[in-house]
Image (spheres, grey):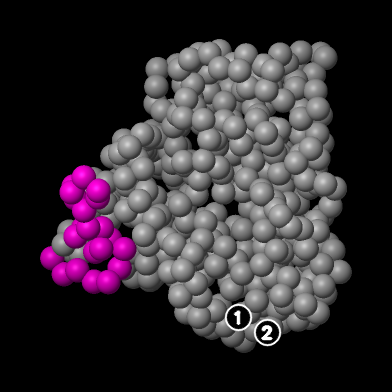
Amino acid sequence: MDHNESGRRLSYPIPGESALEPPAEWAHLRQRCPVARVTLPSGDEASLLTRYEDVRAVLADPRFTRRLTAPGAARISANESGGVFNSSMSSSIPEGGEGHQRWRRMLGKWFTAKRMAALRPEIEAMADRLIDDMVAQGQPADLKAALGFPLPVLVICDLLGVPDSDRDKFSHWSDSMLNLTRYSQAEIDTAQAEFDAYMTAHVAAMRENPGDDLISTLITDTDSAGQHLPDAALVATGRGLLVAGHETTANMIGKMVAMLLADRRRWEQLVADRSLVRPAVEEVLRFDANAGFGIPRYISEEVEVGDVRVAAGTTVVCNMAAANRDESAFADAGRMDLTRSPNPHLAFGAGAHSCLGQALARTELQAVLDVLLRRLPSLELAVPADELRPVEGLIVGGLRAVPVRW
């Protein structure tokens, strides 16, 4: 089934109307063609899912796997080796089943809401220091560069026990793993080799001289079967957490502030009532139209999605941002409502593979927003919202810069 009457195949990702607005095609696809054939940046074909119920069902269905290296699975980008969806991380950590769940349980002990809440004062203190620096340098400032990017890196470096002075390296290595069209294969291979060597040396150093960080704990911990994580899995875990833990949240901090300032009545509502910070963060996550590629899944048997048969050997792409704008799941889905509750959005995925670090991401977003509202209640965008420009060429969505004044 094609997405429109002319039979033209849609290229994916679909550019938005502007950096903060969803593509008009999303609504059309949800209504007319919820399983749409699309062409990926690699030139391969996949099926795009845009309805809430379909996306949630597929993400929770173990038949849809992360085996994106399977014969016949669609390549996401033309440079596939070392990408975040099929790197050494996906081969050294079990992709599914009990092995994957054991790995998640070992990490999950670190990422509980309770443990993340205990980190909150430290995260707020980091945000305060970064805002001090931003204010000292004068206005206008780029909130993404001054606060959005450094804060999550500082937090994840602390968690992993790596020096935050290496954060520019991590940024480059992360970008290369999140590549769609930005880097050549040679650049990706070099970055991945450097990243692997760095993390291998870090794991070895933690074995020699353990600290109270996550990697040191994982070295000594055993899973429910009494097994230690092998070094390759420790290296892959460190890499995965650095990528997931800084890039997505760094971008989300910038987008969150931009969305709240794009219609300044939203910001003023929060200044007047800071108890809305928690539901506001959930609504920002739901409302984010610039969330990036989505989650690809591979299916080895024919399955029905909604009322459409999806053939064996097909790669599907779950677009959570499109699903989060589905009117059948959210009343008045196209409007940002900072008091929305409940808010069962899919920004962190669903099912057994939902985002492991979501408690950390929520804690960081709530802490940053709270500190900004307290410190800079007069904050505003320094450019019109429609002049904000999206990040391009990477799997993650984001804004290139978020110019603000106060």
In this figure, which residue is indicated by the disc labeled 1? Answer: 131
The quadrant of the picture occupied by the N terminus is: top right
In-front residue for pair 294/97? 97
Quick check: 218 left or right of 37?
left
Q: Is residue 254 above or below residue 307?
A: below
* Residue for badge 2: 375
The stretch in magenta equals 208-228
Q: Position of residue 31 (x, y in %)?
A: 81, 27
Q: Within the magenta stretch, is there residue 94?
A: no
Q: Is residue 317 placed above or below 294 in the rendered structure? A: above
x 42%, y 61%: residue: 111
Residue at 36%, 34% in the rendered image:
97
* Viewer-nearest residue: 3 or 297: 297
Is residue 405 among the parts visible in the rendering?
Answer: no
- Is residue 333 visible to us here? yes
> Which of the 4 quarters of the picture holds residue 34?
top right
Residue 285 at x, y percent in the picture: 66, 54
Q: Position of residue 354 (x, y in %)?
A: 50, 45
Residue type at the position of mark 1:
Ile
Q: Is residue 320 left or right of residue 103?
A: right
* Residue in the foreground of this view, choosing between 149 and 169: 149
